């Protein structure tokens, strides 16, 4: 089928018109890395919820029919990336999508967007957090932050967690399915740590200097790059370095432009450099 002559990643996430997050980040990032991005919206926002006012519409009742049309086209995906989900019902829809479209050659990246700083996001219910665990067994790569890793493993949140504690967290997560895990954005004073775990390999920490405040969409840039690198055959550790370095450069440029925190990362300024040093395999 000619539709499947090019690498494609299906991205299941919300669409946000302003604020640089979710699908509005994944589409250009993945495309710039020479992979076709096929978005499946979970909801549509005028701008993200960090603003005082926003408009949104829930896309839940459309998601199944939308995916059915892709099945009629016999689309095959090199990768599947999931992000923010808005309800327990959407978890079931995503599970059904994964059963239909995940083949032996499909790399699935689950970004379990649920919370930060030890707490669930205000839009997240305990039921939704519990059901997020249903997606973990489908993951080849899991990209939680520390809060999300603790929620998924029912582990008390400890912002000062040791490397050994992180390794144990990853082992528990890996027992649920994924062979590759990166716990991202762990606050280490002036630095941020990304803890990289691959089953049957020694875990490694990747550090980068903290640049300005945390901004919306940073995790979406990170997971999109991890997904695109994965389907392009880039080594997992190299991919984490790639994403961390790119985000650090973009953050510096964002500070130079003095953009409001709500406006996210100005990745467009450096998008043409995203493939520097990385050759598609």
Image (spheres, helix red, strand yellow):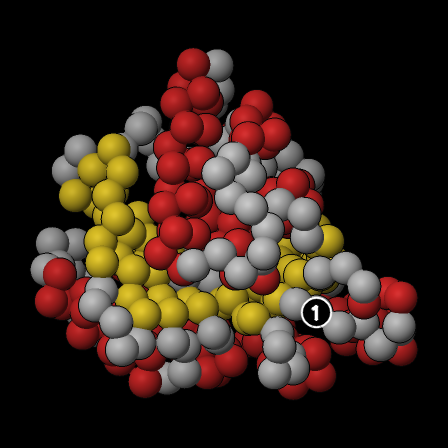
From what the image shows, is residue 65 above or below residue 240?
Answer: below
Left or right? Give the position of 108 relative to 195: right
Tell me if I can see residue 275 in this picture.
yes
The residue located at (43%, 14%) in the rendering is 256
The residue located at (67%, 61%) in the rendering is 9
The residue located at (22%, 64%) in the rendering is 203
Q: Quadrant of the C terminus?
A: bottom right
Label 1 Cα crowd, 10 Å radius (few <14 / some 14-19 / many 20+): many
> Residue 186 versus residue 148: which sits nearer the camera?
186
From what the image shows, is residue 196 above or below residue 74?
Answer: above
- Which of the 4 image quarters holds residue 104? bottom right
Tell me if I can see residue 120 in this picture.
no
Q: Which residue is mark 1?
A: 77
> Residue 143 versus residue 227: which sits nearer the camera?
227
> Residue 152 versus residue 185: which sits nearer the camera?
185
The residue located at (62%, 66%) in the rendering is 79
Number of callouts: 1
**Element at badge 1?**
loop
From what the image shows, is residue 117 above or below residue 66?
Answer: above
| Image coordinates for residue 65, horizontal then vertical, percent | 83, 74
| Image coordinates for residue 149, horizontal then vertical, percent | 31, 67
Q: Quadrant of the N terminus?
A: bottom right
From what the image shows, is residue 215 above or below residue 222?
Answer: above
- Which of the 4 image quarters holds residue 133? bottom left
| Image coordinates for residue 27, horizontal then vertical, percent | 67, 46
């Amino acid at each position: 089928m000619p539709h499947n002559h090019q690498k494609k990643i299906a991205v299941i996430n919300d669409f946000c018109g302003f604020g640089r997050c979710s699908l509005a980040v994944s589409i250009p990032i993945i495309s710039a890395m020479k992979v076709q991005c096929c978005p499946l919206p979970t909801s549509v926002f005028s701008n993200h919820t960090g603003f005082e006012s926003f408009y949104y519409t829930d896309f839940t009742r459309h998601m199944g029919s939308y995916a059915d049309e892709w099945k009629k086209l016999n689309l095959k995906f090199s990768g599947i990336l999931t992000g923010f989900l808005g309800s327990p019902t959407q978890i079931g829809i995503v599970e059904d999508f994964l059963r239909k479209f995940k083949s032996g050659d499909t790399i699935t990246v689950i970004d379990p967007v649920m919370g930060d700083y030890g707490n669930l996001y205000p839009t997240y219910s305990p039921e939704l957090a519990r059901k997020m665990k249903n997606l973990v067994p489908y993951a080849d790569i899991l990209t939680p932050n520390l809060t999300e890793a603790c929620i998924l493993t029912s582990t008390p949140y400890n912002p000062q967690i040791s490397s050994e504690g992180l390794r144990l967290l990853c082992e528990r997560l890996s027992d649920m399915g994924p062979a590759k895990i990166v716990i991202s954005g762990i606050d280490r004073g002036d630095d941020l740590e990304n803890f990289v775990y691959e089953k049957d390999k020694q875990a490694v920490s990747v550090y980068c200097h903290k640049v300005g405040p945390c901004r919306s969409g940073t995790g979406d840039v990170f997971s999109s790059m991890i997904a695109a690198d994965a389907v392009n055959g880039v080594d997992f550790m190299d991919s984490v370095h790639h994403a961390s370095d790119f985000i650090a450069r973009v953050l510096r440029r964002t500070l130079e432009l003095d953009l409001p925190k709500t406006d996210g990362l100005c990745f467009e300024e450096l998008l043409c450099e995203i493939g520097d040093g990385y050759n598609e395999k």
